[in-house]
Image (cartoon, rainbow, N blue to C red):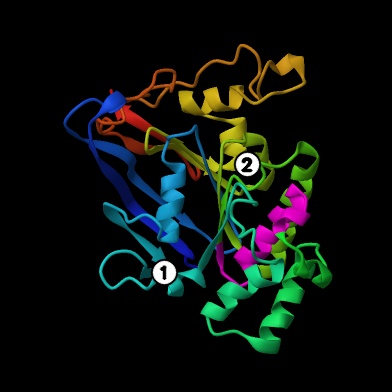
Amino acid sequence: MSAPILEVDNLHVRFPITGGGMLGTGKRTLYAVTGVSFSLAKGECLSIVGESGCGKSTTALSIMGLQEPSEGTIRFKGQPITGPGAPSRMARAKAAQMVFQDPYASLNPRQTVNASLAQPLKLHGITGSEATDRIAAMLGSVGLTPEQGTRYPHEFSGGQRQRIGIARALILEPEIVVLDEPVSALDVSIRAQIINLLLDLQEEFGLSYVMISHDLSVVEHMSDRVLVMFFSQIVEQGGWKEIFENPQHPYTRRLIDAIPDPDVALGHGGLAAGATQPAAPAGWRFGSDGSAAPNVFSPPEPSELVDVGPQHKVRLLRA
């Protein structure tokens, strides 16, 4: 097996908070990401799922260099891209780019599509006919025409604007693309088109995706592997089949049970009605099932990711 293209090792992100209002008084520490580790293979789609506030977006921002880790290392092709001596943000832009949730907010309303796509190329020294040709080719790859490049963002539909956002992310030919809820702001009728486009582009350009999402139906359709986060930690990880068909952690099961399902025989999720919770391996116990709000100002209990199957791990506490 080839070496991973991205490695995240023991990532921690903590924010010092000065109290006031709802946060209380005094100095406190907010634990946003705690001990997150994973790798990403070339051509793989790895999804990070969980409810709002679990730490998945902070993890994505750390990968992009938009949030400095408190501890831990992030490596691209074996080379550290965090800490002293890390490459500049501009250098990292050629390795990883991001597709944002709201396509309209991510585009400059005063710039034409061509100008938005030309800007990152210019910053990296690509101008003239080379830039023009690359812009035209990229617009074609996302299902738009070169003529549409002369228009402004407000002249496009939401789905078209997301195609522009994808084109802007890919214009520098990155190897990793972070997808931050890429279809959640779109109409249901358009979501499938954008999902299929992302899958086609992944195959065409050999892209590796890290997808941040709370929509498990999208995750199931696109992902090779899934990380489930709760209260700043990974609580379960594995292939999409293991996660969706054999979830082990109570919190994962709660997430899957919340997926709307028209098949009344399955209730409101993919788990059969009356399914029982798997027992933890001998000597271990499950932590919180996610039914109670955690104290984000206290570090999570010491725990370990334990193997429960091939490439399938669950976070457990010692009994």
Q: Give the range drawn in magenta.
A: 153-176
Q: Earlier in the sequence, mark 1 or mark 2?
A: 1
Which residue bears the numbered disc 2?
A: 219
Tell me if mark 1 has few (under 14), some (14-19) or many (20+) residues whose alpha carbon lies within 10 angstroms of its own.
few
Q: Where is residue 132 in the image (x, y as percent from the top left)?
A: 71, 81
**In the drawing, does residue 143 fall left or right of residue 47?**
right
Task: Residue lying at the far front in this picture: please name it.
Answer: 110
Secondary structure at numbered mark 1 = helix
Note whether 131 is above or below 62 in the view shown.
below
Q: Residue at x 75, y 39 (%)?
A: 187
Note whether 175 is above or below 307 in the view shown.
below
Question: Is residue 125 in view?
Answer: yes
Q: Report the magenta stretch's main SS.
A: helix
Q: Nearer the viewer, residue 204 or 179?
A: 179
Which residue bears the numbered disc 1?
A: 89
Q: Which of 206 and 98 is in front in this view?
A: 98
**In the drawing, does residue 40 fall left or right of residue 118?**
left
